[in-house]
Amino acid sequence: MTGYTMLRNGGVGNGGQTWMLRWSNRIRLTWLSFTLVIILVFFPLIAHYYLNTLDEADEAGKRIFGPRAGTELCEVKHVLDLCRIRESVSEELLQLEAKRQELNSEIAKLNLKIEACKKSIENAKQDLLQLKNVISQTEHSYKELMAQNQPKLSLPIRLLPEKDDVGLPPPKVTRGCRLHNCFDYSRCPLTSGFPVYVYDSDQFAFGSYLDPLVKQAFQAAARTNVYVTDNADIACLYVMLVGEMQEPVVLRPADLEKQLYSLPHWRTDGHNHVIINLSRKSDTQNLLYNVSTGRAMVAQSTFYAAQYRPGFDLVVSPLVHAMSEPNFMEIPPQVPVKRKYLFTFQGEKIESLRSSLQEARSFEEEMEGDPPADYDDRIIATLKAVQDSKLDQVLVEFTCKNQPKPSLPTEWALCGEREDRLELLKLSTFALIITPGDPHLVISSGCAVRLFEALEVGAVPVVLGEQVQLPYHDMLQWNEAALVVPKPRVTEVHFLLRSLSDSDLLAMRRQGRFLWETYFSTADSIFNTVLAMIRTRIQIPAAPIREEVAAEIPHRSGKAAGTDPNMADNGDLDLGPVETEPPYASPKYLRNFTLTVTDFYRSWNSAPGPFHLFPHTPFDPVLPSEAKFLGSGTGFRPIGGGAGGSGKEFQAALGGNVPREQFTVVMLTYEREEVLMNSLERLNGLPYLNKVVVVWNSPKLPSEDLLWPDIGVPIMVVRTEKNSLNNRFLPWNEIETEAILSIDDDAHLRHDEIMFGFRVWREARDRIVGFPGRYHAWDIPHQSWLYNSNYSCELSMVLTGAAFFHKYYAYLYSYVMPQAIRDMVDEYINCEDIAMNFLVSHITRKPPIKVTSRWTFRCPGCPQALSHDDSHFHERHKCINFFVKVYGYMPLLYTQFRVDSVLFKTRLPHDKTKCFKFI
């Protein structure tokens, strides 16, 4: 207890123990330091000495750390694997060294070849440069020779007369005005383009009296006309609208004459002016009667002989549809040919002939001679006798049930409202038009309205009275659409009408429908016809029809496309020469300025079927670079350079005057890039191919990384404004050939098939020539037309998914064909091929031509198209029936004609011609 207490309290025991601990710790540290010094210093010295002693031994076999032989080292078991690896690596190194030396020798040889190729390239460049110099010198020499042997020709310089220059001596009598003495040709040279200046009627006093509907329709037509210009100083023609006036506005002749003479460009006598008086009603006032119009032309629907100047003034159609387009759904079909009534007539004669002549003498001082016999009584008696005989069902009424429409003296007034008259005419095969009894009345608005309504609903007009001048009579061949019978032959009218065959009657009805649609139906057609008549009279060619400017989509071309073995398997059929020169366009059309002189009559009067194929219609479809078609009973006829024959690549008489020709492929596509690329590659090496126009119908642009194949000809990718199947037939300006091969992006045709179709098309340039045939059929239970794609011995359509046609039809489809058809195509996204077949058959009255026996042309394995949908065929049924309503009849024609090559895959000498088999 005491010891514990001492230790705890820090006594002597505790202090001694502490000192001992400190002393022992110092001894241990010193010993450890000494031991470490001996180990770190003396032990390495001893080891070094010992090793040196061993290495200095005389006997090499007693060395422990010296080098040993390889065999001795390999005897060690764990080093055997390393030895094997070393030997293997040594052997591989030897082999690689040998290969390296071999490759070095090959590289040296290739370097020599490269140097040789570089030298040959340099030599070839020198030769090419020499050839280019030779070609350039030859071309220069050729130009010099041509310049020496040809006169220098250029377009004439247009010299415009002074503003106040009268230019022509005044005619002795105003009624003696004709083009040669009242029209200033110096303002209208051939190269002028026929500029027309239209006055703004609102700037003149009588403009406020005009019928608002007539004025708006006229202004709308003038705004869209291609010839109208705002520069009056360069104008060839000046147009002024003076009627129809609002009721009950009456403009005195003196006031109207004063305002006409105050026109800014009247130039004292009004030469090169056209005064238009459009009528909407049958009792339109003859505003220009007793008005001195000077040298200005007059265009209106009512003329007295005292004011009408033949060959100078124009008889125009009344403006019935002022601001509305005709509704094709309300127009009756052209078939059946015979209707309920053989002929009909409704009218009431208010004043007698003698009283009207006495009234006319008050303002007609030049009327001479006794009035002719009044045939109206004989006409009434004859027509009533035919009606009472009941040999044929006719309807004649000489007294209106309601108040008759106002009319001119001696004229048969219209009865009832327009809708009632049209309903009766829809039931009439013929429509009688009794001309006014006044022989000095050349034409009246009442007769023009009757003629308009008859043509509108397909009743063949029968005009009693040969003295009248029908609208545009000096340009249109009215005997193709109407019967003009002298009044003394009224007793023979019944016999004449019954003698017409159904085919002749249908042809007249179709031609009448064409005349009505083209020249009478709208304000545009009337205004365009007036300008076209004057332009044709003074022999100025029509303006070229516009083309669709192609907005190209930039794209990258990839590697050269290979040749599909299936495409190249052509047997022994000679496809034609490989084109080694750049693509060339079809021959240019070079007869624009002589056309109106040499073919004046043909341009207005000849047409195979219901369509005038010549460009001088109000639409003025003069093609800028394509061969033109002259209307004739046999269809189209190409005009152009050449002296017969067609070159060695085709038969001697194949293709007419086109010795060398190519075609353009137009391919419509929509977001099927892989299918499109495959189809383009299949065109590689196709002879006579000018270029490929890809119509990109999708709003989404092609993929940026898409590589387009290089097929040896240009590929033009065209961007469209909207997704429409009508884009397939737009007349793109990039199409420089007459022949167009319309083909789907999934079509699968061999090169020999395409070339055979092209050869056939060259012999039938007015037809659709293609591969997939279809036909239409009449569904008796439903009384409607059906679209049929089954195998058949007959066909009436060739689908444009693989067909040749002329570019001329692209213009007609896009600009002339009724807009209602294109709207139907956009609505259903279908039927554009049917619409093209309707158009061509309607124009030519010929069926298409099918080549080869193939019924389908789709590529195997391609994604399904729209035609695989069940609704596809239902829509096509509806399209056919709608198109029939628009055209008024079924234009498609059946055929059992097919063209096959007899000598397909048949070996013949090269000097033998190819022949076709027609089955």
Image (cartoon, rainbow, N blue to C red):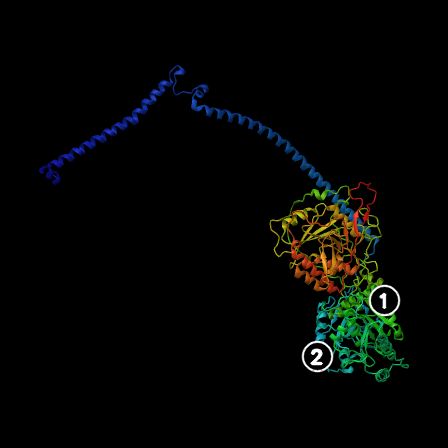
Residue 326: quarter of image: bottom right
Dot 1 corresponds to which residue?
Answer: 500
Question: Where residue 6 appears, x then y in whole percent?
Answer: 10, 38
Q: In terms of depth relative to the viewer, which is nearer, 626 or 227?
A: 626
Asked whether, in this view, residue 802 is left or right of residue 464, the answer is: left
Residue sitting at the far left? 2
Q: In terms of depth relative to the viewer, which is nearer, 273 or 820?
A: 820
Which of the marked residues, 1 or 2, is nearer the chain's N terminus? Answer: 2
Identify which amino acid the numbered label 1 is placed on. Answer: Leu
Asked whether, in this view, residue 557 is left or right of residue 488, the answer is: left
- Where disc 2 sits, the SS reads helix
Residue 543: quarter of image: bottom right
Asked whether, in this view, residue 73 is left or right of residue 825, the answer is: left
Spatial CA span between label 1 and label 2: 50 Å
Identify which amino acid the numbered label 2 is placed on. Answer: Ser
Question: Where residue 187 appears, x then y in whole percent?
Answer: 79, 68
Please say if 871 is above or below 256. Answer: above
Q: Is residue 151 visible?
A: yes
Dot 2 corresponds to which residue?
Answer: 208
Please say if 706 is above or below 107. Answer: below
Question: Where residue 414 appears, x then y in whole percent?
Answer: 78, 78
- Residue 437: mark in rendering: none
- Where disc 1 sits, the SS reads loop
Density class for disc 1 (Cα within 10 Å; few <14, some 14-19, many ≥20) is few
The residue at 55%/28% (across/down) is 96
Question: Where residue 42 appears, x then y in whole percent?
Answer: 29, 24
Residue sitting at the far right? 369
Q: In terms of depth relative to the viewer, which is nearer, 856 or 354?
A: 856
